[in-house]
Amino acid sequence: MVKKNQTLGEFIIENQQAFPYSSGELSRLIRSLRLAAKVVNHEVNKAGLVDILGLHGDTNIQGEDQQKLDVYANETFIQTLINREIVCGIASEENDDFITISGKNNDNKNKYVVLMDPLDGSSNIDVNVSVGTIFSIYRRVTPIGTPVTKEDFLQPGNQQVAAGYIIYGTSTMLVYTTGCGVNGFTLNPALGSWYLSHPDMKFPENGSIYSMNEGNYVHFPEGVKKYIKYCQEEKEDRPYTSRYIGSMVSDIHRNMIKGGIFIYPKSSKANNGKLRLLYECNPMAFIVEQAGGKATDGFNRIMDIQPKELHERAPFFCGSKNMVNKAEEFMRKYS
Ligand code: AHM
Ligand code: MG
């Protein structure tokens, strides 16, 4: 039964009780991410005042350097996780290499690693458009108590224990899955509490929105070009509506609620597209699949790709199941 006005904290406790042998480590980790998200949210909301308070790179009134928001978000998430000693390693889209967290006395016994894109779509901040944070959680594969290695991070998405995103939009939401469906919580900024506003989110099987950067049309593979023409055809249920914010979290969040497909394909300029497999595609794919949608690279399931590099990219087709199936049909036919 869905309770009214349930907070994220209450939801976490209730769900942890369903797994009596769990150590609570994952719950504590989600709580740390929730805290960092609130701090970043506060800063993102002030972004419009930057010109008044001082430009990025300037020194502010307290003598502190103004940071770019993506750097700020990165440091906030990393520092929060380090302070709470809740993970053994972190990899971020903003850092060249992963970070090992060995604990104060070299005694880190935590079993989870976090991979994240701290502020996705950050080029949208200057124009007051929603941005997001994406996170992905894995159980380490190397022995607990030893320093993490690349192996702990280069796991296929199907090994994810949890994944989520925060969308800093007209309201701020945290949407996450631990593999038992998807739930969305909206932040009440006055209280600093997240309320369960979107229980058990479901991706509609069909939709009428297609989201891609059509400015790159001439560089797209033939299958995508043909699929775009299919979306634009005059039929009973078409043409579809084109909606592209350029902020993946927002584009996929909207499509998950309304029904639609998001595509960032490979192009003649970028063989694997733009989006990062580990920080963007895998976590979004886990959420989308848990909501009943589908996520592929145009041919294969995203979460079954064996990553080779931390910052590797992948073409991304994700959204309503039937729409992704249709797009894949075009990919197979014209490749
Ligand atoms: P970022 O991680 O540097 O912000 O880039 C990822 C973003 C996605 O949110 C968005 O879907 C895409 O870049 C937009 O790219 P483009 O401007 O090429 O359409
Ligand atoms: Mg990104």
Image (spheres, rainbow, N blue to C red):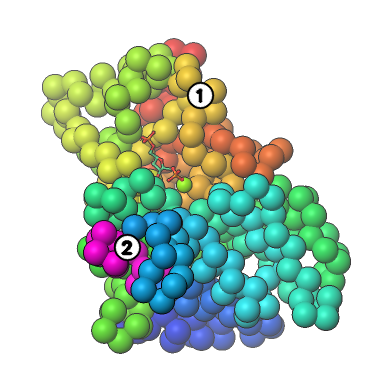
Foreground tag (2 vs 1): 2
Q: Residue at x 36, y 39 (%)?
A: 262
14 above or below 260?
below
Dots 2 and 1: beta carbons under 8 Å?
no
Which quadrant is home to the N terminus? bottom left
Q: Is residue 27 left or right of residue 172?
A: right
Q: Position of residue 47 (x, y in %)?
A: 30, 62
* Image point (34%, 58%), residue name: 55
On the question of residue 59 being in view, the answer is yes
Is label 2's Cβ within 8 Å of ligand 1?
no
Give the prevailing secondary structure in the magenta stretch.
helix
Residue beneath label 1, please? Answer: 270
Q: Secondary structure at mark 1?
A: loop
Which disc, if any, is residue 54? 2
Residue 148, image quadrant: bottom right
Amino acid at dot 2? Gly
